[in-house]
Amino acid sequence: MLISALRTVIIYVVLIAVFRITGKRQLGELQPIELVVTLLLSDLAVLPLQESGMPLLSGLVPIAVLVALELLLSAWMMKSNGFSRLISGNPVVVIHEGKLQQKALRQLRLTVEDLTEALRQQGVFDWQEIEYAIAETNGKISVFTVADKSEEKRKASVPLINDGSFITWGLEFCGITKQEVLTFLKKKKCPLRAVLLLTADKQRRYSLTKKEEHL
């Protein structure tokens, strides 16, 4: 009995350390790769708890390997936007200026009922109030609403460049070409590799954030 209790405490401490190291977010905010790791960790942690005859080290080694893979892939995703998009996908616009994007819903296998429920949870009951809604890579719906229909609609900014790489969906959403962006950067005397984040709205109002080493 004492040994089982001790094994439980060790596994408990190890899992806390693992989640601290990997920087896990809330379940609803996990990216696909993070969700897979979380589910696998829960299964691996159960084995040494249920099998008292199983050496504790045999249960901890797979957990350590999984954590190492998670850290390696996370580092790779931070270095490569292409790899990050391959693993996590891209945000998808599901409502644009109050109009439902049915093709996007089919692509996401998202029903109208699912979308309506997600909007209600954010206090939005009228699609006509929505400038745009985006299905994020973590499965959540981000909504930008128009504050007052009697006023000129506000314009929200979307990312065009992230860490030196173009964001295709952002360019398409704003109707801005890569050449236009490069021309803007040239005026700012800022090379593409020096851009940490560049956002813009449909009125081509840009907001540029340079990497610290290029400031």
Image (cartoon, helix red, strand yellow):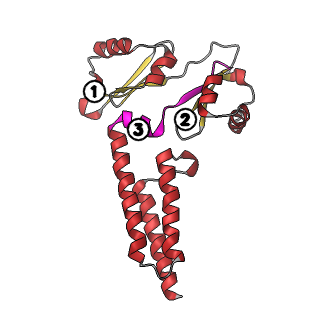
Q: Quadrant of residue 96?
A: top right
Assess disc 1: are there few (<14), some (14-19) or many (≥20) residues with their C-alpha within 10 Å of its C-alpha: some
Q: Is residue 56 within the magenta segment?
A: no
In the foreground, 19 or 89: 89
Left/right of residue 69 with respect to residue 124 in the rendered view = left
Mark 1 highlights which residue?
193
Mark 2 highlights which residue?
136
Tell me if residue 81 comes above or below residue 47 in the rendering.
Answer: above
Residue 100 x %, y %: 67, 22
**Residue shown at the point (28%, 14%) measured from the top left:** 186
- Give the label, 1 or 2, closer to the camera: 2
Mark 3 highlights which residue?
84
Residue 59 x %, y %: 43, 71
Residue type beneath disc 3: Ser
**Residue shown at the point (49%, 68%) measured from the top left:** 45
Of callouts 1 and 3, the N-terminal one: 3
Dot 2 falls on a residue whose secondary structure is loop
Of callouts 2 and 3, the N-terminal one: 3
